[in-house]
Image (cartoon, helix red, strand yellow):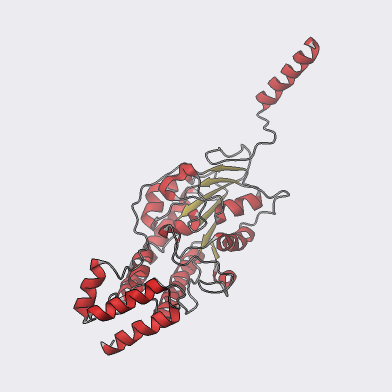
Amino acid sequence: MGLRRAVASTLLTIITTMGVTVGLAPTAGAAGIAGTNDMVSLGDSFASGVGSRTYYADSGSCYRSPASYPVLAAGASGLALDFRACSGATVANVTTGQLAAVDAGTDYVTLTVGGNDVNFAPVLTECAKPSWWGNCDAAINAALTILRTQLPGRLSALYTQIRAQAPAARVVVTGYPLLFNGTDCNLLTFFSGAEMARLNAATVELDTLISTRTTAAGFTFADPRPAFAGHAWCDGGSYVNGLSSPILESYHPNTAGHQAYAGVVRPLLGVPAATRVSAPAGVSAGSGVQDLGAATFAAPDLGSAEARAAARAAGVSTFELAMLRAAQLRGVPAAALEALDRKISQRLGR
């Protein structure tokens, strides 16, 4: 027994000294494995994994998820992941709060950013209101002004800095999927067909800008739109959450959507698929937590003081507002509710 104990002790010492770890799954906060190619993930909620409903506890309000496309892509490629993407991030937030993770030793970078720069959540909030309350066209027009006049320079400056800090890294920049199919299937929102068409068109313009600037920087553009075709909100087999609880999850890819994102990004990394796909070689998910206080989507509440004030200002009668609210609470079909709201708007000449 003494000899066995001595041999076991010697073997344990050797294994510990060599840094060999057997049978341990990587967890959030784990450092990347020495000698393993590494990937740094930058960006906003579409990169952090919002919509998947499962998050690393130590990622705080960044809401980084083990079901996000960076974790899935890194795991499928055998890469160690430094996960810096954060819900609510703008280009400026990536530059000041995430980019420090990228350096000359970085092998791969993924990035999704730009949506919050053009006020993604506030625009959706405005467009979800009835037409007599919200001004969707004005919100979209303001977003497009930022997209056309300010965002091009912001993106180019960020891409230049990434290349300066990581001269040899392969950089994959993603666009955004089209969220709408022209139908609003939720009783608590009032997206019209025309509004959803404009929102999708604005997304196309945003993706075109990101693609153009990405290519000009010598990076690779990953377009998720083909993968999401036929899987918008209200489609059967949707890859997108509608109005959700908690509301943070609303209008973001669900788990199937993040898998679709990963399916687009992973081949563009140019890394042979890992022999055994489970988790990245190492994940650092707790680092770089940012308290951004970013705006989130807010559903219109027809029973609120704000709704009553908007109705009075627009000339909607107390009876009409009460009728619309009662129909909502009864759970009438979304199409019938939309028809009722349209009738009110037509009376108002809108």
Residue 325: image quadrant is bottom left
Picture coordinates of residue 153, whole percent (x, y): 37, 63
Q: Quadrant of the N terminus?
A: top right
On screen, residue 258 above or below 288: below
On screen, residue 274 above or below 219: above
Residue 344: image quadrant is bottom left
On screen, residue 30 above or below 218: above
Residue in the picture at 30% in, 85% down: 345
Work out whether residue 317 can be spotted: yes
Work out whether residue 349 can be spotted: no
Residue in the picture at 66% in, 23% down: 17
Task: Give left or right: position of 158 versus 302.
Answer: right
Picture coordinates of residue 71, whole percent (x, y): 57, 51
**Front residue of 287 and 297:** 297
Q: Quadrant of the C terminus?
A: bottom left
Q: How many marks?
A: 0
Residue in the picture at 29% in, 68% down: 303
Task: Give left or right: position of 305 versus 253.
Answer: left
Residue in the picture at 23% in, 76% down: 311
Picture coordinates of residue 2, whole percent (x, y): 78, 10
Task: Give left or right: position of 48 versus 298.
Answer: right
**Front residue of 325 and 109:** 325
Q: Residue furthest top?
A: 2
